[in-house]
Image (cartoon, rainbow, N blue to C red):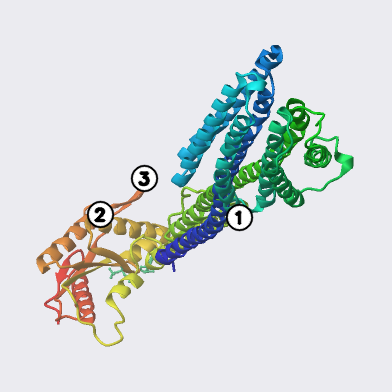
Amino acid sequence: MVRPGRGNRVLMQLQLQLKTGAALLLAVAAGVSTYVFLGYADAYRQSAQNLQTLTSYDLVLKAGNAVSAERAPSNILLSLDPDAGQAYVSMQADVAAARQRTDLALSDLQNLVAKQPHDGQTMIELAAARKSLAQGRADIDCLARHAPSDRSPQDLQNAIDAMIDARTRLDPVIQNFYGAALRHAPDQAGIMQGALILSDLREFGGRIGSMLIVPLSTPEPISPARRAVIIDLKGHIDQLHRLLPGRVDPASQGRDDIDGMRARLERGFFGHMLSLIDQLVAHSGSDYGLRAASFTRQVLPDLMDLERLEDLFMHRAIAQIAQTHRDARRQMLLTGACLLALFCFLVAALRAAESLIIRPLLLARQEIINLASGHLSRTPRAGRSAEVRALHDAIDTLRRHQILTTQLALERDHLSEALREQAYTDALTGLLNRRALEEVVGDLSAAPVVLREDRGLILLDVDYFKPINDEHGHVVGDIVLRAMADRIKDVVPPPHRAFRYGGEEFAVLTAGLSMKALCALAESIRRAIAGHEVLVHNALSLPVTASFGVARGEAGQSTWLNLLKAADTALYQAKAKGRNQLIAADSVS
Ligand SMILES: Nc1nc2c(ncn2[C@@H]2O[C@H](COP(=O)(O)OP(=O)(O)OP(=O)(O)O)[C@@H](O)[C@H]2O)c(=O)[nH]1
């Protein structure tokens, strides 16, 4: 039995399961991808912040170095005579260039501090540093305009101290940025600390040199106070030297990388410069053999090496963070792209499952239902996969079988109908036979059957038929019988029915006719028979008559047996009365 509702539900459930499965898969994938994506997004955001922090830290170190470095050309200028000509003018230009670099670095730093949420103290310290720097520069410019002999040692020292003070004012600013950088990029702490140490070494080395400018310029012995400062600074330098990271390999001294610079520092700053200072301190009070300008020029390359190494340190740290930043961005984009691709794949898979599986199954199911319901024509199909094609082949086989079965059933019905007709038809006349009448009347030997509706029965028998047979033969007799049947057929209208009752005897069974109408019908038959001779062939035509017995039974009162008896008796009477006439029986019980 076909159950369309259930089949539909199964397919709907399959569709729902597919969608639920895909949604679950997508949710899990989305969850995992989002987790990974957020991780990379966080790393991306963090690395961007770290990069910003390190860049800012680099900026503040550069500003500190610029302030420290500005002292070298200033110190040389203070040891030159304004009448020295080109050397003086050239050094003035160097000082101006150094000041420009310092101003630029400080402006960058100030802009940075203004943008970032640092405490107001940083701005105050920065302003104080600029103020000291301006003071130092004014003092230097003032002193530089006078002949060396007119420059008092104290004024010189004041100018140098103002420049040192400017750098000292920057220390808390640098510490602030260092602390922030450590918090944001703790994995770069070693490099950042190394850079800070180098910046401090640059400053302390510069300060020792500055402590010697006045004695070398005057020249005069190094005062105990200056000596104490120099010893203190050397102590700091020793401490920082021990903390300075990096492997010292003399073999790498010629290279420009971190190891090369580190090796050069050992030989230059920690070797040559500190030895030179020790020598000058040891010669205090005698001839130093060196003036301030040449001293400064000798130690300047060692100090600049400190700056270069610091640059290398910071560059490496920034490059590493920048790489992390790029990696995080790439991974973030990759994860996002994978998530999108997965989403598109699942949607496409769902759509494909719907068009390649669900829809073909639904259509195939409908086609099977149609076949089962007797609609044998092909319905629209979908799907090209081998499995669906196999299903369609199976449906086609089923259709062919259904068509064959239907044809066989039709043929069987036709055959049954033909057999049935044959069984109830008289072969000679084509009228219904006696068996057909008995089918209506029932078994007369059993209990009498009362009529369920008004019935009329006309029995007619051909008169003197035996002589026809005898005289002309049975073939002619058969022709006469067929002619009788044709005339009866012509006269008896449906739904009344005519039968060949046996031999040369016929019966007409009517329903719902009154006795008068019944007699009129019998009379019509009689006239149709008696009115024209039967044309056997061109040379022979035979006059034929028949006798009629007519009876009528009423529904619920008469029985079939009595109706037949009454009609038969009436026929007998008609024969007896001379034939070619009809006799109507009395009411039948
Ligand atoms: N040719 C032919 N003759 C048949 C057929 N069936 C019965 N007969 C003949 O019909 C004849 C009937 O004759 P009867 O019973 O003596 O009746 P009748 O000669 O018609 O005389 P009444 O009926 O008394 O007028 C018989 O000779 C049967 O052989 C048939 O199918 N074909």
* Extreme-right residue of the structure: 251
Amino acid on which the number 2 mark rests in the picture: Asp
Q: Are marks 1 and 3 in contact (CB under 8 Å)?
A: no
Which secondary structure, mark 3? loop
- Disc 2 packing (10 Å; few <14; some 14–19; many ≥20): few
**Closer to us: 282 or 521:** 282
Give coordinates of residue 475: x percent, y percent: 42, 58
Tell me which image quadrant ligand 1 sits in.
bottom left
First in sequence: mark 2 or mark 3? 2
Q: Which residue is mark 3?
A: 538
Residue at image position (31%, 59%) is 485
Amino acid on which the number 3 mark rests in the picture: Asn
Q: Which residue is mark 1?
A: 387
Q: CA distance from mark 1 to mark 3?
A: 77 Å
Amino acid on which the number 1 mark rests in the picture: Glu
The residue at label 3 has a CB less than 8 Å from ligand 1: no
| Relative to 148, 467 lies left or right | left
